[in-house]
Image: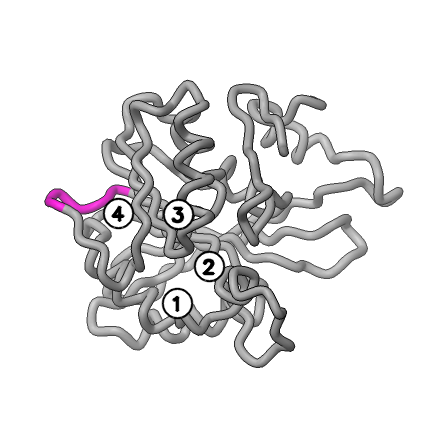
Amino acid sequence: MFRFKQFTIQQDRTAMKVCTDACVLGAWADVAGARLLDIGTGTGLLALMAAQRNPVAQIDAVELDEAAARQATENVAASPFAHQVRVWNTAIQTYLTPEPRYDHILTNPPFYTNSLRSPDKAVNRALHTDDLPFADLLTAVRRLLRPTGMWWVLLPPPESDRLTRLAAELPDRLQPVRQLQLCHHAQKPVFRHLTAYRFAESSINFMPEHLAIHELDGRTYTSDFRALLQPYYLIF
C-alpha cells in the first residue's frame, strides 16, 4: 500500500508497483483539458494524480491485465475522484472511445524486449513489450489523440530515443516538444526520459529539463523534487 495526501494506492494484485519515476511523470506532465487517457494504468496511479490536478477532467484509464484493472477500479472507487475516472479492462489496440479525442495521453509503457522473463505472467506483461510493442502504441496514440493534443511518455533513454525515431517516421509525425531527464543525483547518469510529443510537420528545437531526485548524499531529496511532489507525498 502507498498512501498519498489525497488517495491511497493498494498494489498487492498488480505487477507494477508505485515507483518514483512514475510519480514524477504524474506530477510533471501537463494535464489541462477536458479529456485525458492513461494507457496501461496498472494501479490507477497516473489517472488519480491527473484527477487531483485537474478537477474538471474526465479520465479514461485502460489496463489489459484483469487483476490490475480490478485493483485500479477499487483504488479509484476509494478515492475522492471516483466521479472523474473510468477504468477499462481491455487492450489499447481494440479500445474504442467516442469523439472528441483526448487532450492529453499519459503512458508508462513496458519497454523490455529481450530480457530474462519472470515466471509471473503479469510481471512479463507489465515489463515486456510483447502485448504492447511500440508500433501498436504509436498506432493507438495517433488514433486517440486530438490533433492539438500532447502525449506524455516515461522510458529509459535508449528506448525513448527509439520511440522518437519511430514516431518521426510516421506520416503525421509525432515530434518531441518537451523532455525531463531524470537522475538519482547530479553525479549519476540519467535513467529516465519523460517526453512530451505532439503532431508537427518538422522537428521542434527545445532544451531538455533536468531533475535530480536526491542531493549528492543519495538520501536528501532536492528542493526541486520536493516542490514537484509536495502536492502528493505525505513526507513533504
Horizontal placement of 164 versus 174: left or right? right
Q: Secondary structure at mark 4?
A: strand
Horizontal placement of 222 versus 20: left or right? right
Rendered image: mark on residue 30: none
Q: Which residue does the numbered mark 4 point to in the structure image?
A: 149
Q: Earlier in the sequence, mark 2 or mark 1?
A: 2
Q: Earlier in the sequence, mark 2 or mark 4?
A: 2
> Which SS type dominates the magenta stretch?
loop
Q: Earlier in the sequence, mark 1 or mark 4?
A: 1
Dots 2 and 3: beta carbons under 8 Å?
A: no
* Residue at (39% x, 26% y) in the render: 77
Q: Which residue does the numbered mark 3 point to in the structure image?
A: 106
Q: Residues within 10 Å of mark 4 (few under 14, many from 20)?
A: some
Which quadrant holds residue 135?
bottom left
Measuring from the top left, give residue 21's x and y in whole percent: 60, 47
Q: Which residue does the numbered mark 2 point to in the structure image?
A: 109
The magenta stretch is 98-103
Label 1 to label 4: alpha-carbon separation: 21 Å
* Residue at (59% x, 31% y) in the render: 228
Seen in the picture, residue 123 relative to 84 is either above or below; the reply is below
Q: Which residue does the numbered mark 1 point to in the structure image?
A: 132
Seen in the picture, residue 70 relative to 224 is either above or below; the reply is below
Measuring from the top left, give residue 120's x and y in whole percent: 59, 64
Q: Earlier in the sequence, mark 4 or mark 3?
A: 3
